Image (cartoon, rainbow, N blue to C red):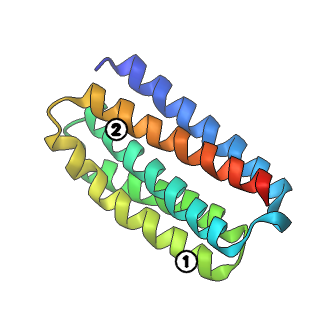
Amino acid sequence: MENGAISILMYVDLLLVLFFYLYLRKRKERISYTLGMTSSMAVGGLIALLTGILLILQFPFHFTYITMFSAISGGIVGAFYGRLVDEGLFVLGLTNGIMIGLMAPMIGTVIEMPVPFLVVLQAFLIGCVLIIFLSLKRA
């Protein structure tokens, strides 16, 4: 996969997660505990997974730095999404993002067909955001 496409995917993922967080923050009084748990685990975990895989595909010989970066980015995103509800979900999102971020570069090194795999992961991220958005609309 071309490096420019990887950079664009990471940028689009970052914008999607940022704008969705800002949307949720404006409506945080309507977020239930289970929806907050789902959003912190799903979004934080998928961002950690996508970050680790995309970076290991772009920089295959920087495994240690990519592992640390994906764990930190997943933990931060999960923590921010969990903090919208309470401190328990803050810790849950943080640990889930870190754990998936630690595993993501390992997955990225062994995938044989990265393009179909990334398309499915992107669809999971967009699907999760869409489902959480629709659930919030119903609440």
Identify the residue shown where x is 53% and y is 42%: 127
**Crowding at mark 1 (Cα within 10 Å: few <14, some 14-19, many 20+):** some
Q: Quadrant of residue 55?
A: top left
Image x and y of residue 107, in percent: 22, 48
Residue picked out by circle 2: 55
Identify the residue shown where x is 58% and y is 39%: 14
Horizontal side of residue 89 vs 7, given as left or right: right
Tell me the element at label 1: helix
Q: Earlier in the sequence, mark 2 or mark 1?
A: 2
Identify the residue shown where x is 70% and y is 78%: 86
Tell me the element at label 2: helix
Image x and y of residue 79, in percent: 59, 66
Horizontal side of residue 122 vs 43, given as left or right: left
In the picture, the disc for residue 134 is none
Residue type for callout 1: Val
Residue type for callout 2: Leu
In the image, 5 versus 136, the foreground residue is 136
Seen in the picture, residue 1 relative to 117 is either above or below; the reply is: above
In the image, 40 versus 55, the foreground residue is 40
Image x and y of residue 1, in percent: 28, 20
Image x and y of residue 104, in percent: 30, 52
Residue picked out by circle 1: 91
